Image (cartoon, rainbow, N blue to C red):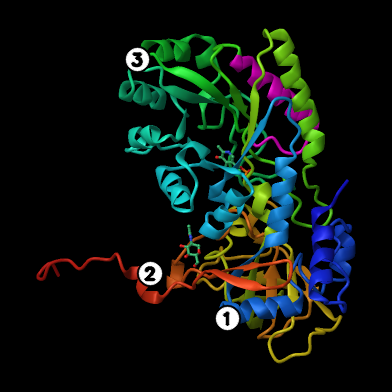
Amino acid sequence: MKTPHASLALLTLLSTGAHAFAPNLHRAPSTALRATPPSQSNFLTPELAASCIATASGTPLYAYSLPALAEAASACLAFPNAYGLTVRYAMKACPNGSVLKYFLSRGIHIDASSGFEVRRAMEAGFQPEMISLSSQELPGDFADLVKMGIKVNACSVSQLERIGKAFPNTNQKVGIRINPGVGSGGFSSSTTGFSKTNVGGPSSSFGIWHELLTDGTVPSIVETYGLEVERIHTHIGSGSDPAIWQSVATRSLSFCKIWDTVTALNLGGGYKVGRNPGEKTTDLIEIGAPVADAFREFAKENNGRELKLEIEPGTYLVANAGALVATIQDKVSTSDHIFLKMDAGMTDVLRPSLYGAIHPITILPGSGKSSDIGTDTESVVVVGHCCESGDLMTPKPGEPEALEERTLRKAEIGDIAVMDGSGAYCSGMSTKNYNSFPEAPEVLVTAEGEVHLIRKRQRLEQIYENECDVPQGVF
Ligand SMILES: *Cc1c(COP(=O)(O)O)cnc(C)c1O
Ligand SMILES: *[C@@H]1O[C@H](CO)[C@@H](O)[C@H](O)[C@H]1NC(C)=O
């Protein structure tokens, strides 16, 4: 099986000429990595990290690897399919305009989670027809968006009724997002199997419960308003097991039989990505092959109906393409632990304190030091910069409130910590501005080792620019 990160590390090494460092082969067993912590991250050599810091005028910052985005995009575009494929980027994973524009240049479409995301994608250059909206909160202006050409999926019975009332008896095309009654993990689930929310099954609020389709409720609403169902959508966070994918595809295809107007089946995202050594990244060819078979079988059994496949990867497209680069700004100890304090934290990467996600952390030499940080190691707890006990970067897996020591290269104040696997649900989902820390800048790193600023560091005034004074005399 192909290992994107090993080849990416090699690519970076080749292109930057950083021969002094062995590639951090991502599939090494975790014990090996613990024994000898790596001297470079997924894609940032010490030299490249220094160049990112110079471009962003300091830390913290997020760096994104263009070759890693490219490789993930190519893998998704090669997803096996029987009668056509549309790849939609679930933009909530990392919504910066430059990332969106890159995927647009690759012919990838958009899965938006709110009306605001729809507008943001259009601002980045996507045509309305390329955007599919599946939202927990139907935007107040959804009718305007639909008139522009946005494809809207009804994610609840009330959403379907609101769409019907806005376009009565016009054969308005609509998609139906279904909760098929099964689910495996949530959007936030890591490869180690824990997750905070389910996106499918009886404990999930996402989509229309499948029994409301089979008992006639949904078909009767569709008929009442004269709608035309053209898409069936399921997103249950299906993980990396081909058997689960086959059963999800077969189950989802069964809903396509309800309306012969359905032309596409969207199977959502949830392709797990290995962020840490020993964790498996979903093999899209392996999980996609039985899905393509199921589509062919469907065509055979249903008068040659050739359905198009849509997939909506978020995590898969960006997770390992991003890294948070921070400075170790303090080091303290107690009777039990040595703590490293970063100049970043839950304000930048929320996943560890939200549900105990594990990100690899690599220590690189701070400015002014030789690029060899030495081979001494130390067991430490890494924390963020917020006055908040939950701002913990090395939790026990799945236990956000329990701390766990990590063996890292020995770090002093001023050294650099790189948290890999921070491309998805990090810059876009954090406790932004907590403690009034500004939003960190973002840079894009090319295969040639060029670094481009794609978002500036926020200024303090921007944090409070929308605050209003109360009239005089109120206090
Ligand atoms: C979040 C989301 C995705 C992407 O999920 P990942 O786990 O990041 O791949 C896809 N589809 C929908 C509808 C989503 O809400
Ligand atoms: C992404 O970053 C660029 C560069 O700072 C900025 O101009 C742009 O507004 C950002 N785009 C989005 C959609 O956040």
Query: Magenta includes 35?
Result: no
Q: Quadrant of residue 418?
A: bottom right
Q: Is residue 76 above or below residue 434?
A: above
* SS state under label 2: helix
- C-alpha span from label 3 to label 2: 47 Å
Q: Quadrant of residue 300?
A: top right
* Relative depth, front residue between 267 and 130: 130
Residue at horizontal 46 percent and vertical 24 percent from the top: 174
Q: Amino acid at mark 2?
A: Ile
Tag 1–tag 3 contact (CB < 8 Å): no
Residue at horizontal 89 percent and vertical 57 percent from the top: 29
Crowd around label 2: few <14 · some 14–19 · many ≥20 (10 Å): some
* Relative depth, front residue between 298 and 358: 298
Q: Is residue 295 above or below residue 398?
A: above
Chain-order first, disc 3 or disc 2: 3
Q: Amino acid at mark 3?
A: Asn
- The image shows a total of numbered marks equal to 3
Provide residue 185's location: percent of width, then percent of height.
65, 38
Tag 3–tag 2 contact (CB < 8 Å): no
Provide residue 291's location: percent of width, then percent of height.
75, 26
Is residue 17 left or right of 236 when viewed as pictured? right
Mark 1 vs mark 3, foreground winner is: 3
- C-alpha span from label 1 to label 2: 19 Å
Chain-order first, disc 1 or disc 2: 1
Q: Amino acid at mark 1?
A: Gly
Residue 58's tag is 1
* Residue assigned mark 3: 169
Crowd around label 3: few <14 · some 14–19 · many ≥20 (10 Å): some
* SS state under label 1: loop
Q: Which residues are magenta?
A: 237-256
Q: Is residue 96 visible?
A: no
